[in-house]
Image: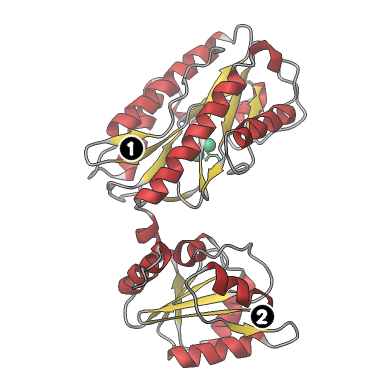
Amino acid sequence: MTTESPFETRLHRCQDALSDDETLVLFPSPNLLYLTGFEEEPAERHLLAFVTPGDFAIVAPEMYADQIIEETYIERVDAWADGDDPMAVVEDVLSRLGVEGGRVLLDDRMFALFSLDLQAALPNAEFGLASAVLDDLRIRKDEGELDALREAGRISDEASEAIRAMGAEAVGMTEAELAAEIGAEMEARGGDGFSFDPIVGSGPKGAQPHYRHGDREIRAGEPVILDFGTRYDGYPGDQTRTVVFDGEPPEEFERIHAVVHDALDAAVEAVEPGVTAASVDEAARSVIEEAGYGEQFLHRTGHGLGLEVHEAPYIVEGNETVLEPGMVHSIEPGIYLDGRFGARIEDIVVVTEDGCERLNHSPRTWEPL
Ligand code: GLY
Ligand code: MN
Ligand code: MN
């Protein structure tokens, strides 16, 4: 007796979620990885997987055929060689699967090039996005995914503490040098690279929420936003602490940091099954608004976390998605004072039966450790 791989189980759940006239077309992306275990960078060659309620096929360059069969449960690849017309193979596959039109749901990450090819091949189809079906599966994590996310969180936390313990030693280093140290600390603890380009935003750079890092030297008394994570078993960490390595920060920094910390706590307190994503955003936002900094909270409160660092559910005004156990998302309120400094604190939480589990535990204070 053979046991089904977790990826095959996901494929079957996805097929059960499709209506009779729906076909998913996937491209190298987190969606394809989620359903098959096959991981590849998006590229210019036609590599397209087709999922119908009762069938599956994958069209791939010949050079990938053995690899796909060896690495996944997939037993057949419809291959094409460089120099062939890949769309001729796609058309044969569509005809074998009986796909003539209906609703064709394209991978949200698919290049426009392939999307136009498919629209030309299926002129009678109505096109939509694969996320319409897949988000609902990917949004609730299974135990294996949660374990990987916990471990990614633990490694990121330990690296954060090690970096903060540098104290005055970090003063005079450039943001880029500190980013490299962060990478080394995570690697030494079993992390697999950065889950996204790390943010080391010192002084005024910290007022730009998605600044990355540069050649600016860290100064004493300056707030520094440290937002980074690593991957473990394919799943990312993402946490933020705003710290002062040495010396006394501006008085207003202490005030905004305390407000951001209160906003984080209020949002964590608000997370439980049955509440909407928007209500968690509101819990954080109202604390910051009441303190008079509403205009300086420049972004949503959070985002889901899974194979992708940003995915559903988005913790944002207007999102009526109801939270359920197994959903994972960030809570990352921030206040940004243009040209001066910023403060953000970010933890990842898992929605549980009666509230939430935090995946980050490193000190949320700004003081040197
Ligand atoms: N990578 C920035 C964030 O979402 O936390
Ligand atoms: Mn982050
Ligand atoms: Mn985040």
Tell which circle, 2 or 1, labels the residue nearer the N-terminal end: 2
Which mark, residue 280? 1
Give the answer, above or below, for where 21 lies relative to 281.
below
User: Image quarter for residue 7?
Assistant: bottom left
Which mark, residue 308? none
Q: Does the closest atom of ligand 1 sit within 8 Å of the Cβ of label 2?
A: no
**Residue 277 appears in view:** yes
Dot 1 amino acid type: Val
Label 2 Cα crowd, 10 Å radius (few <14 / some 14-19 / many 20+):
some
Q: Nearer the viewer, residue 146 or 174?
A: 146
Specify whether 243 is left or right of 24: right
Which residue position holds label 2?
A: 62
SS at circle 2: helix
- Residue 240 in percent (x, y) is at 52, 30
- Residue 120 in percent (x, y) is at 57, 86
Tell me the mark number nearer the camera, choosing from 2 and 1.
2
Task: Quote the CA–CA distance across marks 2 and 1.
Answer: 48 Å
Dot 2 amino acid type: Glu
| Coloring scheme used | secondary structure
SS at circle 1: helix
**Residue 289 appears in view:** no
Q: Report the residue at 69% width, 17% height from top.
A: 170
Q: Mark 2 and mark 1 in contact? Answer it, CB < 8 Å.
A: no
- Residue 300 in percent (x, y) is at 45, 40
Q: Nearer the viewer, residue 178 or 111?
A: 178
Q: Nearer the viewer, residue 340 or 236?
A: 236
Q: Report the residue at 68% width, 74% height from top.
A: 45
Q: Quadrant of the N terminus?
A: bottom left
Specify whether 368 is left or right of 218: left
Label 1 Cα crowd, 10 Å radius (few <14 / some 14-19 / many 20+):
many
